[in-house]
Image: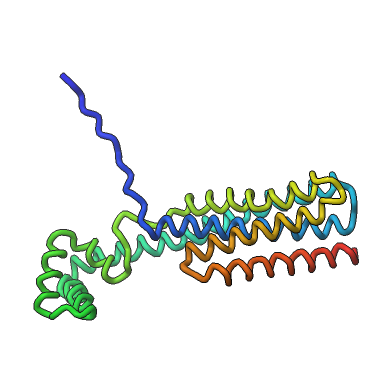
């Protein structure tokens, strides 16, 4: 006699869930680049000891990566708590005030140009199939069982922040003396261009504006921290 083994299937991520993870990654990478290069320029302007520069940059890279990850985890956890609370509230309202919930669904389609009679038919059919899923989708654009994952956001931010910071760190500490400064500047500019491009693509923004903005911020960050290192 054969035994059937049922594998638990994880629901496919929605666009919003994927976008949230990508957002955390882009922000983490950008923060990793700027914070690490800030420390590197401050320390390198004050000392030529490569080991001191490397340790300072590495310590900041690790601190930045874990700080970004913990911040994303806390932020997205709060969002997830809010979403689950909303779903629980709507589930209770369906038990105590079904008519108002049905009316909200009807109004949703009326607001989108559907006639009241047609909207009532659509709402009745959708509510009969999945009342809770319909209500939270109509009122909050939520999909039942799909909540923002704080672990995905934290991991994405952790890896991207560490990856972003590693480029200026390697350039400053491993390139030959005469190439260290221009190599680091080039690494920061290139990384800032990439994160600007990705942030614009994921956020449906203007690519050129985002890239220029990121590069300017990177240059200002390097200039400020170089100046701090000079007066230390």
Name the quadrant containing residue 34: bottom right
Residue 143, image x and y in percent? Answer: 30, 60
The residue under the point 69% across, 48% down is 166
In the image, residue 211 sits, relative to residue 145, either above or below, namely below
Colour style of the rendered protein structure: rainbow
Q: Is residue 207 left or right of residue 193?
A: left
Name the quadrant containing residue 212: bottom right
The residue under the point 20% across, 73% down is 105
Residue 90, image x and y in percent? Answer: 26, 66
Q: Nearer the viewer, residue 17 or 209?
A: 209
Name the quadrant containing residue 27: bottom right
Q: Nearer the viewer, residue 2 or 193?
A: 193
Residue 156, image x and y in percent? Answer: 53, 51
Residue, far top: 1
Q: Nearer the viewer, residue 76 or 40?
A: 40
Q: How many marks?
A: 0
Q: Nearer the viewer, residue 183 or 25?
A: 183
The C terminus sits in image quarter: bottom right
Q: Is residue 182 left or right of residue 26?
A: right
The N terminus sits in image quarter: top left
Residue 112, image x and y in percent? Answer: 23, 78
The residue under the point 23% across, 69% down is 93
The residue under the point 38% across, 58% down is 15
């Amino acid at each position: 006699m054969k035994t059937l083994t049922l594998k638990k299937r994880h629901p496919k991520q929605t666009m919003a869930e994927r976008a949230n993870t990508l957002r955390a990654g882009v922000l983490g990478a950008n923060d990793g680049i700027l914070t690490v290069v800030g420390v590197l320029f401050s320390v390198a302007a004050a000392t030529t000891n490569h080991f001191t520069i490397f340790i300072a940059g590495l310590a900041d890279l690790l601190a930045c990566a874990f700080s970004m990850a913990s911040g994303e985890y806390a932020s997205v956890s709060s969002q997830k708590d809010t979403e689950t609370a909303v779903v629980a509230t709507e589930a209770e309202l369906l038990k105590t005030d079904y008519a108002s919930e049905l009316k909200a669904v009807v109004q949703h389609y009326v607001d989108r140009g559907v006639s009241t009679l047609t909207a009532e038919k659509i709402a009745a059919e959708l509510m009969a199939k999945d009342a809770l899923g319909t209500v939270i989708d109509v009122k909050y654009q939520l999909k039942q069982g799909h909540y923002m994952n704080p672990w995905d956001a934290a991991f994405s931010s952790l890896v991207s922040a560490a990856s972003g910071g590693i480029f200026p760190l390697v350039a400053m500490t491993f390139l030959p003396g005469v190439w260290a400064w221009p190599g680091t500047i080039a690494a920061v500019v290139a990384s800032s261009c990439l994160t600007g491009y990705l942030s614009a693509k994921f956020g449906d923004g203007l690519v050129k504006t985002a890239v220029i903005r990121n590069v300017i911020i990177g240059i200002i960050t390097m200039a400020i921290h170089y100046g701090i290192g000079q007066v230390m």
